[in-house]
Image: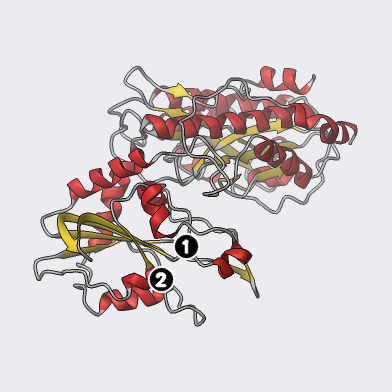
Amino acid sequence: MRHFLLFLLVAPSFALPQDLPVRSRLSDDVHGIYDNDLLGPAFHRERREALRAELPTGGVALFLAAPVRNRSNDVDYEYHQSPDLYYLTGLREPQAMLFIFKEPRLIAGERTTELLVVQDRDPGSEQWLGRRTGPQEAREILGVAMAMGAQRFKYTEIPWSTTDIRFDHGEEAPVDDPHSSTDLADLLRQLDTTAPRPTPNGASALNRWMAQLREVKLEEELVLMRKAIDITCLAQQELMRRLEPNMTEYQTEAIVEYVFKMHGAEHEGFPSIQGGGPHSCVLHYTTNRRTLSDGDLLVSDIGAEYHGYTADVTRTLPANGKFTKDQRTIYDLVLAAQEAGITEARVGSPFRAPHNTAWKVIAEGMKALGIIQDEADLRRYFMHGTSHYLGLDVHDAGTYGELKAGSVITVEPGIYIPRESPCDPRWWGIGVRIEDDILITEAGPVNLSAAAPRKAEEVEALMAK
């Protein structure tokens, strides 16, 4: 535990490997905005216009804020906005709705193609829960053409036509708050008394358009993704330096998440997976309570979330700093499969091209080792896809067609051989996954998470320091 205790004393000295470019943005106590590198109003406005271009004549897209989720009794989970609504507005508050109209229409004396409805400012509520944006600042700070408070919206008529086509986002139905007359459930109930019914399959169409937009990242998004990935790589590096036998899985989790917070990540993009020993063979293990033994492998699958965008980087580490011969054999096979898969992450390739290539490398290697006799048996030990999109969600929206320049995907093959598997027991308990975040470019794949060592000898060298 000596290294872990030392970590607690010296951790504040971490530094990012390089300063990332930032966008100028209001940052003051008056508006409650403290980051100067948030996505700006121009980004969100352009994204709304791109979606509006997809709507048919008479089309109206309706997006609802994500619900507040209850943890227990009177304690709620920390709020997380619907990624689509955040992408289109930058709003991070509940009880809101966004309309995007194909053609301009006159609402409350203003001609507009968009309307954002937010909760009104309320000093009493803000004393307990913090500052609300309110309609005036929604215009000034978020840059929407028209914003309206919920109270006013209840008494405002939207001019609907019999030719309007309503596309609802498909967010789950809001729960009515008996203590509020202007929550999202009330607003939606009011809307449904006059608005046309949602068109059949409208949610599917809207989700498809949003997937097309979010699949290809703009440069502003890539700045934030690189920051999230850099922070995650620092966390993996620090874990390599500090990991030792008799450390608990939750202590390894504490190390990586401390690094996240020290460098400004608001959250983890997903619950940190720190699977040691037998848990290295459990794909999404998050209990993180076991004590690591000498000779264990630790699968560390983590991602910092920075301004909404998440990383997803996995490294497999020997708890004592040195792979056994058999562990190294499996590790090198997974690494070879990953490297082969990354080479297939090119513009125009089918989305599953990295997986298909990685699968073949692992299948041949596992047959050569005698662990399987036939390729059909591989699914027992490699049971997941190799790639997913990455962005505002860890499993981000995308079309899953041909790979496009500007997309970010993971490449993450793995081999998992739990005890009692039908193979030589020498392989039992070995679980290995290696995952990197790959930017698709016209010039070829770019590994955004290359700063976290991958080769076995590099991992061992850093762990020896």
Q: Are marks 2 and 1 in contact (CB under 8 Å)?
A: yes
Which of the pair 391/376 is nearer the observer? 391
> Which quadrant holds the N terminus?
top right
Residue bearing the label numbered 2: 184
Rendering quarter of residue 13: top right
**Residue 157 visible in the shown view:** yes
- Establish if 458 lies above or below 294: above
The answer to whether residue 85 is above or below residue 165 is above
- Residue type at mark 2 is Leu
> Residue at coordinates 50% horizontally, 27% vertically from top-left?
338
Q: Amino acid at mark 1?
A: Pro
Extreme bottom residue here? 178
In x, y percent, where is residue 193? 25, 80
Label 2, label 1: how far apart the Cα atoms are: 8 Å
Q: Is residue 166 left or right of residue 9?
A: left
Residue where numbered disc 1 is placed: 94
Question: What x and y, as percent, mark residue 158?
Answer: 21, 69
Give the image quarter of residue 118: bottom left
Q: Is residue 238 left or right of residue 402?
A: right
Q: In the displayed structure, does residue 304 sit left or right of residue 399? A: right
Residue farthest to the right?
2
Depth check: give the residue in front, 366 or 357.
357
Between 199 and 282, the one nearer to me in the picture: 199
Among the two numbered marks 2 and 1 on one chain, the one whose residue lies closer to the N terminus: 1
